Image (spheres, grey):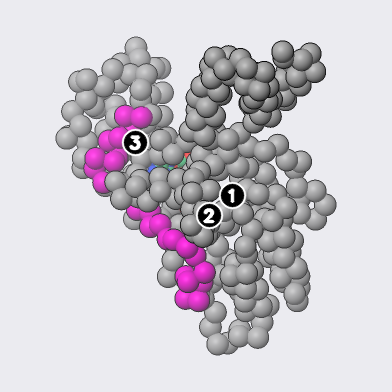
Amino acid sequence: MTSTSQLIAMIRSHAAGDSDRFLSIAEHIASDAASSGKKKVAGDLQTVISAARAAERGRPAKPTPITAPRGELAGLVRASYPEIQMSDLVFNADQSRRLTRAVREHREHEALEAKNLAPRRKFLFSGPPGTGKGMTAAAMATELGLPLFTILLDGVITKFMGETASKLRLIFDAMSTSRGVYFFDEVDALAGRRGAENDVGEARRMLNSFLQFLEDDDSGSVIIAATNHKALLDPAIFRRFDAAFVYAKPSVDEARRVLRNHLLQFDLAKIDWQSLDGALADLSQADLVAAASDAARDAVLDHGAELSTKLLKQALEDRQSIHPD
Ligand SMILES: Nc1ncnc2c1ncn2[C@@H]1O[C@H](COP(=O)(O)OP(=O)(O)OP(=O)(O)O)[C@@H](O)[C@H]1O
Ligand SMILES: [Mg+2]
């Protein structure tokens, strides 16, 4: 018989969102049933429990609620819980395959660990502005059910001897205690190539400690570094990463997908996509998102919410003028 205390414990774990505990109690009930001869009840229970466990595994875990970074750490990292998913991003096939694989390594880390392998955790993203580096870091956090910790470089980099190194240590220590995706945006500020002239300066010290912390890190956290200028990075940094992803401005096909994804509320059947190709040149994915919104606003305010090729073309051309010649 299911005891009242088991029922209470199940309700409590349900209320706390602890489905693992909920299912463990259900397993106890099933095994109690089996040992008191109720084979059919036990079998039925075990079937639904297994199905629930399998469904649970396929779903990204919810982020572990953590307290916001406190003390000195509060000025060094910002915690957030993004909701962006990988499917919100437009990628080329190769990038998509590699990122999906990286996420899968974490979701299925147990299978890897059983064979003495570990998921890759240290990634370098490089490429021009507005191509999805920051957005991928956020999507990675969502997909893994982890908080995103964005490193606040202004807080980390100081001109005082050794201070940056001790701030970096705090961040790298936090990676073990608060598992998450740690995002070092514009990492060239931290790990830029150093010339011989400032070899003994604070910049060299900062670079060396970053390289050392990155190399020594064996936390379970994911570390993502992003840069617009890969060539500015100190060459010693590359081997510290497990994988590098190169971002680029979109192909014509990708550009069309970005526009379509942001204009779902309009009828696009009459859009002459080919005639827009010329207006896409040089625009980043971020530019395209902005142009789509511009065109959408024009359509709603001046054209009875009808989006035409002409409006879209105008918005794309207007966006071009944002770029330096
Ligand atoms: N690959 C993409 N697919 C869909 N939308 C994108 C993509 N890349 C960028 N965007 C859009 O552009 C915005 C800015 O992108 P994001 O911040 O990821 O760029 P970034 O590569 O980090 O740029 P920066 O180097 O300037 O920091 C996103 O919020 C999103 O709306
Ligand atoms: Mg960014």
The response on whether ligand 1 sits within 8 Å of label 3 is yes
The N terminus: image quadrant? top right
User: Relative to the observer, which residue lies in front, 302 or 68?
Assistant: 68
Quadrant holding ligand 1?
A: top left
Q: Say what amino acid the circle numbered 1 marks.
A: Val
Disc 2 from disc 1: Cα separation: 20 Å
Q: Could you tell me which residue is drawn at 49 percent across and 49 percent down?
A: 111
Asked if the residues shown at circle 2 and circle 3 are in contact, with their CB atoms under 8 angstroms apart, the answer is no
Disc 1 from disc 3: Cα separation: 25 Å
- The x, y position of residue 239, in whole percent, is 47, 71
What residue is disc 1 on?
181
Number of numbered discs overlaid on the protein picture: 3
User: Relative to the observer, which residue lies in front, 247 or 169?
Assistant: 169
Which type of secondary structure does the marked residue at label 1 adopt? strand
Which type of secondary structure does the marked residue at label 2 adopt? helix
Disc 2 versus disc 3: nearer the observer: 2
Disc 2 from disc 3: Cα separation: 37 Å
- The x, y position of residue 269, in whole percent, is 22, 20
User: Relative to the observer, which residue lies in front, 129 or 48?
Assistant: 48
Question: Can residue 264 be seen in this snapshot?
Answer: yes
Q: Could you tell me which residue is drawn at 72 percent across and 65 percent down?
A: 169
Residue 66 covered by magenta stretch: no
Q: Is residue 48 left or right of residue 254?
A: right
What residue is disc 3 on?
258
Upstream in sequence: badge 2 or badge 3? 2
